[in-house]
Image (spheres, rainbow, N blue to C red):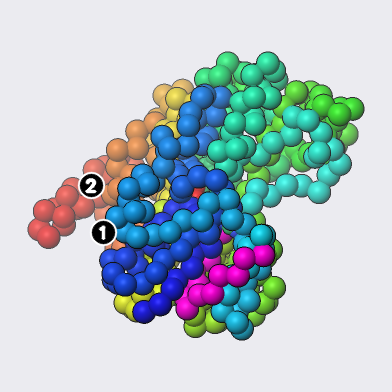
Amino acid sequence: MGRTVIVGNGVAAVSAAASIREVSQSEEIIICSAEPYLAYYRTKLSNLLGTIFSPPEIFIYQPSWYEENRIEVMLGQIVKKVNLKNKEVITENDDNLPYDTLIITTGGSPRLPRIDGLNKHGVFNLRTCEDSFKIKEYGESRQDFIIAGGGVLGLEIAGALKKWKKNVKLLVQSNQLLTRQLDPEAAGIIDGMVREQGIEVYYNSEAAEISGSHKVNGVYLKEGNLVSGEVVIFAAGIHPEVGFIEESHILGKAGIAVDENMRTKDPNVFAAGDAAEFQGIVQGRWPVAKIQGEIAGYNAAGREVFYLQIPPYNLVQTLDMQIYSVGVVSNENVETFSSGNSSSGFFRKLFFSQGRLVGAILIGDVAYSYVMKEAVSSGNDYSNLINNRTYTEEIISKMVEEYQSRNRSI
Ligand SMILES: Cc1cc2nc3c(=O)[nH]c(=O)nc-3n(C[C@H](O)[C@H](O)[C@H](O)COP(=O)(O)OP(=O)(O)OC[C@H]3O[C@@H](n4cnc5c(N)ncnc54)[C@H](O)[C@@H]3O)c2cc1C
């Protein structure tokens, strides 16, 4: 055994460190963290927006965990380069850190449009505790907020801003909300619920320029009209944070390309989480980063474990809404069953392809999300269930019964 250096300090990093320590008591583990805090639950930042909190409240592990597991964390250390040939990591302070094994878990950076005015006061994104503190400070005395992005993060930020008693305008590039999680029918229901809470939604709207002399007073859209607002928060996805890697042979189309052991083309280098690209896809999701971190750690420490792509799933709880989505929710070439409507705030839709559940959406009551997730992951054949049945609720009841009897007999 030797020294493993982990670059980045999010959930993928600490999951990797935990796996290494499970396999080996003697491996030296060093985490290099650009942020000045121990790893924290980044997903909690959206709900906490507009509140006063201190980072230790959301730490994944308290300092004692690092001590007990002999994991050294170098806080505030930005890695500016990795030299794969010499097996060393170089920090911004020009410190050279040799490694035997390297795990890259540098996550993602918010994607910003290439438009004028991004440097004006009042333009933000939300990725770190520092971002949250800056928005709190600047936004405290301001009322009108614009969020650019109609995905999960955009809606979560909208929910926090409403709790903070702010006015919210939502710019959505496509013609519906939650494009990755919902089909147009379900998105229409969510649109109604979002507007009911006083949020203005602008579809097919792309920011073209930030307006204002040195402080934001609005956003010009590509169509030319001005949406007024004092604060703009971009929530339009991420790109993997891999700019410090010069050796392009370990890079894929977007992130660091890894195999099912989370190993790159360099046998001593692994990657996981939002920085990693598996089968051409960067998932950008917490549970994936956690599992990939664990797998990278095990393999780095010599225990071979394989990563299986898990179907995309999301539970969105914001603006008094509960939305669960799993799998592929496109209406093309599938048989769909749905129940509920916008007035009840309750909606369920199942997407079957050749008898197999490929996707599901639950709005309002998400109690059976685990049944839907298992059904999509397992690829079980439900042909018998859906043939001659037209009532969605009947199909769901039968799926729940089957799930329960399967899990009782295990
Ligand atoms: C507000 C918010 C809400 C979210 N909500 C959800 C949700 O509801 N569900 C969901 O599935 N996902 C959600 N996500 C996404 C989820 O948080 C990420 O997928 C997950 O955190 C990725 O973990 P990671 O360890 O790969 O990277 P990160 O958590 O991004 O950690 C990477 C770390 O590496 C550090 N780093 C980067 N470059 C360097 C460098 N050169 N040197 C040293 N350190 C470096 C960064 O500073 C950072 O600390 C949300 C994200 C945000 C921001």
**Considering depth in this image, is 281 or 5 the residue closer to the camera?**
5
Mark 2, other Cα within 10 Å: few <14 / some 14–19 / many ≥20: some
The answer to whether any part of residue 323 appears in the image is: no
Q: Quadrant of the N terminus?
A: bottom left
**Going 84% across and 38% down the picture, which residue do you hit?**
117
Residue 343: give x, y in percent of width and height: 46, 23
Relative to residue 224, is residue 163 depicted above or below? above
**Considering depth in this image, is 409 or 81 the residue closer to the camera?**
81
Pointer 1: what residue? 384
**Going 29% across and 55% down the picture, which residue do you hit?**
68
Relative to residue 351, is residue 366 depicted above or below? above
Which of the numbered marks, if any, corresponds to residue 400? 2
**Considering depth in this image, is 204 or 351 the residue closer to the camera?**
204
Amino acid residing under circle 1? Asn
Q: Earlier in the sequence, mark 1 or mark 2?
A: 1
Residues drawn in magenta: 94-107
